[in-house]
Image (cartoon, rainbow, N blue to C red):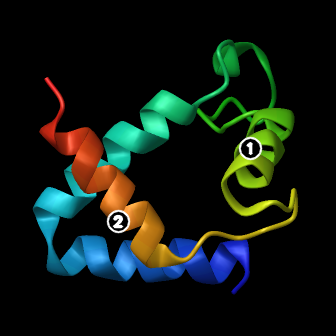
């Protein structure tokens, strides 16, 4: 799976389940680059180095694309945190 396909898969699941959409937005906000508003394209995207590190520690490969189920499980876990 590629990153764009993963994004589309998660978007489709969010349309079906709005509570999941809220949880996914929480995860996206937590992963944003600290000073995202200072850099073009001025979107709250994660830092590339951080994302590579997270993929390496979780899957053993910097270029790994996580399965949608893993992201959904993590987002639901984050949604249950206070």
Decide which of 11, 52 is in the foreground and name it: 52
The residue located at (86%, 36%) in the rendering is 49
Q: Which dot marks residue 51?
A: 1
Decide which of 39, 23 is in the foreground and name it: 23
**Residue 81 point in image, percent of width and height:** 18, 31
The residue located at (37%, 53%) in the rendering is 74
Q: Which residue is mark 2?
A: 72
Secondary element at tag 1: helix
Nearest to N terminus: mark 2 or mark 1: 1
- Residue 69 lies in quadrant: bottom left
- Residue 7 lies in quadrant: bottom right
Q: Which dot marks residue 13?
A: none
Q: Are marks 2 and 1 in contact (CB under 8 Å)?
A: no
Quadrant of the drawing holding the C terminus: top left
The residue located at (82%, 47%) in the rendering is 52
**Residue 53 point in image, percent of width and height:** 80, 41
In the displayed structure image, the side of residue 9 where residue 37 appears, left or right: right
In the displayed structure image, the side of residue 26 where residue 20 appears, left or right: left
**Residue 73 point in image, percent of width and height:** 32, 62
Q: Dot 2: within a 10 Å radius of its alpha carbon, few (fewer than 14), some, or many (20 or more) residues?
A: some
Quadrant of the drawing holding the N terminus: bottom right
- Residue 50 lies in quadrant: top right
Decide which of 2, 63 is in the foreground and name it: 63
The residue located at (55%, 77%) in the rendering is 67
């Amino acid at each position: 799976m590629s990153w764009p396909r993963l994004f589309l898969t998660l978007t489709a699941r969010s349309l079906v389940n709005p509570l999941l959409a809220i949880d996914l937005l929480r995860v996206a906000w937590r992963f944003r680059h600290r000073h995202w508003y200072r850099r073009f394209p001025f979107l709250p995207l994660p830092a590339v180095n951080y994302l590579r590190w997270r993929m390496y520690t979780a899957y053993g490969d910097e270029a790994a694309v996580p399965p949608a189920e893993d992201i959904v499980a993590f987002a639901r876990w984050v949604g249950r945190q206070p």
